[in-house]
Amino acid sequence: MKELGLTALGHRMRLRDYCSKQKKVGSDENEMKEKLEKLRALIGASAQSKSRRQTVKDTATTKRQQLRFEFGWKHWSDRRFKQKKVNHGGGSRVWDVPRFATLDDCLEIAKSLFFPSDKSPAGNAKDMSFALGNYSGDVIGDLEENGHLCSFAAERYKRVTGLNRPRLYLLS
């Protein structure tokens, strides 16, 4: 069976059924060769589907190199940061961030989301200063993990906050 390439249980069962039917019916040599070719074609199709599954697995592995974050925008107004709503160019945007993205990388992503062409309803990006913050408007800097200060990385931030989909705010 192994010489024919029949390593899967399903293939062996099909061959057994085929042989038992042939015993009952009786057939000539050409018909048997024809059915054997069909069987080999089935085995080949099975091998192709395995390689297709492997490709899907590789894609999933590549996708895990990205982390999904939500980005929002808060603009300084009346001595506090106010969240910009969707109808004013803000809202919430979901974006895949590289696992080891730095604070500057995330800041650039946020600026590109809310300030396309360096402009927004709140004004020109060149006239503003930016930072990344959390939900309460606190600026994010180094992170404390296990009692040690560590530099920001997207993966580390997700681990420290314990959120499934962390949210970062562009503070302007």
Image (cartoon, rainbow, N blue to C red):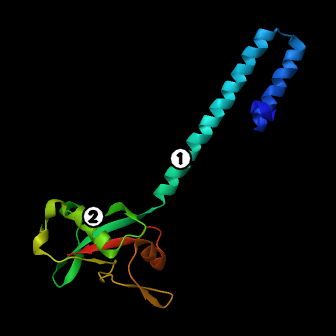
Q: Is 135 located above or below residue 38 in the figure?
A: below
Say what amino acid the circle numbered 2 marks: Gly
- Cα–Cα span, label 2 and label 1: 33 Å
Q: Considering the numbered disc 1 on the image, is that residue within a helix, a strand or a loop? A: helix
Q: How far from the left and from the top, in percent, is residue 147?
A: 48, 91
Mark in the foreground, 2 or 1: 1
- Quarter of the rendering containing residue 104: bottom left
Q: Considering the numbered disc 2 on the image, is that residue within a helix, a strand or a loop? A: loop
Q: Nearer the viewer, residue 88 or 4?
A: 4
Q: How far from the left and from the top, in percent, is residue 153?
A: 40, 75
Please give left or right for residue 71 compared with residue 87 in the image.
Answer: right
| Residue lying at 21% horizontally and 76% vertically, measured from the top left | 130
Please give left or right for residue 128 compared with residue 57 in the image.
Answer: left
Q: Nearer the viewer, residue 134 or 33?
A: 33
Question: Where the N terminus falls, by quadrant?
Answer: top right
Question: In the rendered image, which residue does mark 2 sit on?
Answer: 91
Question: In the rendered image, which residue does mark 1 sit on?
Answer: 56
| Residue lying at 81% horizontally and 10% vertically, measured from the top left | 29
Outermost residue to the front: 3
- Quarter of the rendering containing residue 132: bottom left
Question: Where the C terminus falls, by quadrant?
Answer: bottom left
Say what amino acid the circle numbered 1 marks: Val
